[in-house]
Amino acid sequence: MLNQVKAYDGNPITEVHIVGGVHPKLDLNFFGELLSDIRAHRPELHIKAFTAVELDYMFRKAKMTAIEGMQFLKEKGLGSIPGGGAEIFAPEIREKICADKCNADRWLEIHEATHKVGLKSNATMLYGHIESIEHRIDHMKRLRDLQDKTGGFQTFIPLKFRNMDNDMDDVVESTLQEDLKVYAIARIYLDNFDHIKAYWPMIGRSTAQLTQSFGVDDVDGTIDDSTKIYSMAGAEEQTPALSTNQLIDLITQAGRIPVERDTLYNVI
């Protein structure tokens, strides 16, 4: 894993993003050492790593509380955590689409612990499959309530369900009109979130441009073809990579002003 980071030595990257799955032979100490090695090799990099699903497994295996586990990883070099694994919080939907993942209460508990140790996190929602509008609002309400409590979420990222090569390939994907409604409602309802992100590798560049007129103020970064899981599921971008100039054009063509930020939304 460290070799993947070393492959970018000499390149002006600002963040390393680490997510994977739950590996039965790898534990909290292994990942702690990985964070330490990355920080020692390239201390200026911000490390955003591990979904709540992965963290839940690590902490249970280490017999640590969420607070203890997050403090341990923070001391090893963790800078923030992504929002993956949230899917839809409603238990009746979660049981059908991701029964093997930690439940909503545990996901929220781990993010609350992240905020309590002084780290930021992101939040996601997988929409456009078998959930109802009520399920989406319930999902956002739980995020909104935790944000009122901790203020630790940075951005909300709606993730469009893609139906290729998975067990729900019979589900018709949401329309562009529905996608834009999700972004607009999220921006209105999640008034205590500073940012709404459109993840362009999943929805495509043209749709990402449109979302900037529906509440989105963040279209993520240059990525460099590292999100193949979305390509495999049928995402618009099969080779997700943009140059800085291409990203600037995507924003300016939508009538917006491009601003470079770091992982913690400080303006560069």
Image (cartoon, grey):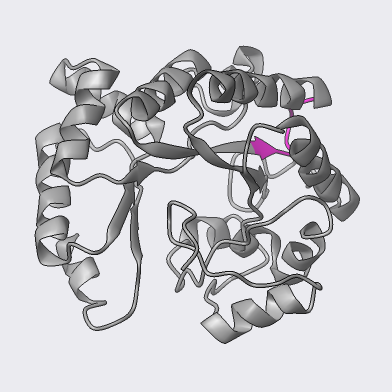
Q: Is residue 92 left or right of residue 241?
A: right
Return the x and y of residue 218 as percentages of the image width and height. Answer: 63, 58
Along the viewing direction, whichever of 134 and 232 lies nearer the viewer: 134
Task: Quadrant for residue 129, please give it.
Answer: top right
Q: Is residue 253 left or right of residue 155?
A: right
Task: Assign the magenta stretch its main secondary structure.
Answer: loop
Task: Quadrant for residue 140, please give it.
Answer: top right
28 in the magenta segment: no
In this rendering, does residue 30 appear at all? yes
Residue located farthest toward the right when viewing the structure as drawn:
177
Q: How many marks?
A: 0
Instruction: Tell me if residue 219 comes above or below residue 145 in the rendering.
Output: below
Task: Quadrant for residue 38, please give it.
Answer: bottom left
Tell me the residue at 61%/18% (across/down): 145
Return the x and y of residue 166 as percentages of the image width and height. Answer: 58, 45
Quadrant that contains the N terminus: bottom left
Instruction: Tell me if residue 6 comes above or below residue 173 in the rendering.
Output: below
Return the x and y of residue 57 as percentages of the image width and height. Answer: 28, 26
Tell me the residue at 62%/83% (across/down): 246
Tell me the residue at 33%/32% (across/down): 118
Residue located farthest toward the front when viewing the structure as drawn:
267
Instruction: Tell me if residue 4 comes above or below residue 103 in the rendering.
Output: below
Tell me the residue at 53%/69% (across/down): 260
Along the viewing direction, whichever of 62 and 197 lies nearer the viewer: 197
Q: Is residue 149 left or right of residue 234?
A: left
Q: Which residues, given as a range, are shown in magenta?
A: 126-132
